[in-house]
Image: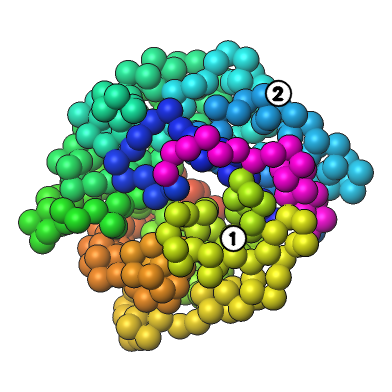
Amino acid sequence: MKVVLHLTLNCNLRCKYCYAPAKRQEAMSTDTAHQAIDLAVRLGERSACVAFFGGEPLLRFDAIKELTGYAEAGARRRSLPMHFRLATNGTLFTEESLAFCRDHDILFAISLDGDEAAHDSARVQASGKGSFALVDRKLDAILEYNPHTVVTTVITPATVDRLLPSVEYMWGRGLRYIVHQLDYSHPDWTPARFERLEAGYRQLAGFYLERVRSGARFHLGLFDDKLKTHVASPFKLGEICDFGSRRVSVAPDGRIFPCVRFVSDRADAADYCIGDVEHGLSARRDELVAENRRERPQCAGCAHLGRCTNYCGCLNWQTTGALTTVPPIMCAHERMLIPIADEIGNELWSERNAHFLQKHYQEHAERFVYSFD
C-alpha cells in the first residue's frame, strides 16, 4: 500500500495550471501523519510506501525527517520493506535534504517543464517571476545525489513548440527519466495547437530513435509507456490505475481520498472521501474502486482500448466531473500519440534493435516470432 501524505497546502511557487487547493498555511499534524503511516504499514502486504506531497513538501523538511524515522521503525516491527517517494518542484533542495534522501532511499521526482522559455511560461513564483533559474542551479547537486531523478513535465498550449528544445536541454543537463503530462484542462487547446503538438511529438520521435540506436539508457514516458502497453496489452481497467486500491492520498486534516487530485477545494471532492486516518478506510472505497473499473461506454470498439489513459479516474473527474466520462481532448490526444509510438516500435522492431528488445521485451531478437504490427 502506498500512502501519499499532503504535508502542507502551501508552496513557494504559483504554477498557473496547478490543480491543488489554494496555497495557504495548512499543514498536517504529526499525529495525523503518524496515523497515516500506521495505515500504510497495517495495510502493506509485501511492502509499504510513504510518499511526501504538497503543496511543496520540502517546506516541511523537518517533518519529513521525523516521519521517515517513524515509518522505518514501524516497518521494521512488521519485517516489512518500506519505500519512500517525494514529489517536489526541486527549488528548495539543500545539501542536507539531498543527503537525507540518498541515505534513506527517498526517490523523488522534480517538476521541470523544459528549457527556460517553456518552464517559465507557467511555473512562476508568487511574484510572477519565472522559477527556471531556481531549479536549474540545483540540478548538478540533485543528480550527484540521485542520478536516477525523474522529471515531470507538463505540456500546455504555450509549450507545444518547445518540446524538442526542452528535452534536448534536459538531456544536456544529464536528466534521463522524463515523464510528460498534458494539461487537459487548459482552455487554449485548439485544433491548430494540436497539429503543432503532433509535429512536436514527431520531432521527439526522431530524438528517441537516435538515442535508442546509440545505446543510451533512458526513459521517455511519452513513448515508452505506450510501447509498454503494446507489449503487455490489452490492459484491463484497474490494472494500470491504482486509484484507491494500492494507493490513497491523505489530506492535511486526515481525510483519505483515492488519488491526489481529490485533495481539492472543489465542492464535489468531498463525495470522494473514502475514510480518515483515525477510523480507517470506509465502504466508500470499494464503491469508488468498482466504479472506476467499469467500462467507459464512449470507448466501446476503439482500437486503442486497453492502451490509452481513459482508465485515469481522477483525470476524468478533474476534466468532466465523472470518473468514467473521458474528456474528448484526452481521446484526441491518445489517438494521435499511440500511432506515433507504434511507428517507433515498428521501426526498431524491423531493425531488431538489441537495445529496444532488451528494454521492452528483455529477450534477444532471434527468439521472437512476434510481429510488432
Please name the residue shown 70% across and 23% down the image: 103
Q: Amino acid at mark 2?
A: Asp
Left or right, 51 with reference to 80? left
Image quarter hosting the N terminus: bottom right
Please name the residue shown 73% across and 37% down the image: 30
Q: Secondary structure at mark 1?
A: strand
Left or right, 293 with reference to 100? left
Image quarter hosting the C terminus: bottom left
Please name the residue shown 31% across and 45% down the image: 17
The answer to whether 121 is drawn above or below residue 203 in the figure is above
The magenta region covers 22-44
Q: Mark 1: few, some, or many residues within 10 Å (few <14, many ≥20)?
A: many
Residue of label 2: 103
Q: Mark 2 touching mark 1, by CB under 8 A?
A: no
Q: Is residue 242 visible?
A: no
The answer to whether 322 is drawn above or below residue 19 in the figure is below
Front one among 80 and 27: 27
Q: Is residue 8 magenta?
A: no
Give the x, y percent position of residue 49.
69, 47
Q: Secondary structure at mark 2?
A: helix
**In which quadrant of the rendered view does residue 217 lie?**
top left
Left or right, 209 with reference to 56? left
Left or right, 102 with reference to 331? right
Magenta stretch prevailing secondary structure: helix
Disc assigned to residue 75:
none
Q: Is residue 34 magenta?
A: yes
